[in-house]
Amino acid sequence: MSDNFDSALTYTSYLAVDELLSLQRPLSVGPEHDEMLFIIIHQTYELWFKQIIHEFLQAQRVLESGDTHYSLAILGRIRTIMKVCVTQIDILETMTPLQFNAFRSYLSSSSGFQSAQFRKVEALLGRRDTKMAGHLPPDIQAEITLITSANSVWDSALAYLAKRGHAIPAEVLTRDRSLAYEASLGVQDVLLDVHRNDPESAGVCERLLDIDEGIQEWRYRHVKMVERTIGHKIGSGGSSGVEYLSSTLFNPVFKDLWEIRSRF
């Protein structure tokens, strides 16, 4: 009888370490010392984005099932991952502008703007516009279209509150998911009641706000890191660089949760 134990399995084979360590391929002549750091930091970001997507999808399932305690755990994990993403910028900022420019030309038109996974994260969080994926390959565009036609994380949170007996307006619950969510006074009234009378649901709302704040913190640190490294040059992918990144700042994901702060 098999107990599903693979005696040949090792740390290296289970984690595909050999394959993982072969994925860093500097292009610069030498190569330039700091290109390895640049590659590893961005590959690590892609791994964290993959995990964040994985966690958000689970969070949506759990929220929609009405499971408060598991929701709190998953949302707390996402916030902790976001903190790690912010901390990685500290490492990247140990590279000076001169060190980055020593290999920047080898990047050609590649840019973080092309990260399909980050666009998926934005789509899960409710971004709904044609600009977010138009520059990506057709198969990725199709995947993002699928995400934007379904519940966002906020839609799942509203479904959770409705399942808990809170009177979320019907027009909000039945809205067209392919359109961007607009802040709702009706929802804000419900959220105030939640915070005053339902501590468990209020805890879930505060975890969502933690994540929103974490995303804004990551965007700000990212902008300042880019400005510190290349100033106001055009981005390597042809974007406006710091100007474009700055335009993404201070745009909350869960607008209703911020709007109620002045009403307590």
Image (cartoon, rainbow, N blue to C red):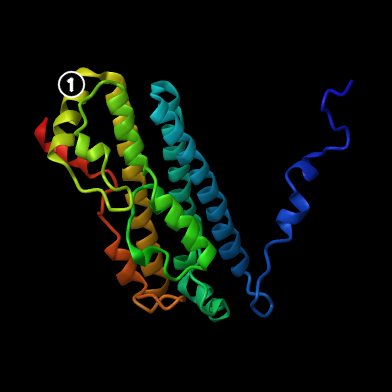
Label 1 crowd (10 A; few <14 / some 14-19 / many >=20): few
Q: Which residue is mark 1?
A: 196
Q: Is residue 260 left or right of residue 94?
A: left
Q: Vertically, is 1 above or below 88?
A: above
Q: Position of residue 187 (x, y in %)?
A: 18, 35
Q: Vertically, is 181 above or below 192?
A: below
Quadrant location of the C terminus in the rendered image? top left
Q: Position of residue 208 (x, y in %)?
A: 33, 36
Q: Quadrant of residue 257?
A: top left
Name the residue: 45% across, 56% down: 144
Q: Position of residue 173 (x, y in %)?
A: 26, 37
Name the residue: 60% across, 59% down: 40
Q: Is residue 205 left or right of residue 89?
A: left
Q: How many marks?
A: 1
Dot 1: element: helix
Name the residue: 49% across, 76% down: 98
Q: Amino acid at mark 1?
A: Arg
Q: Position of residue 21 (x, y in %)?
A: 72, 56
Q: Visible in this render: residue 132?
A: yes
Quadrant location of the N terminus in the rendered image? top right
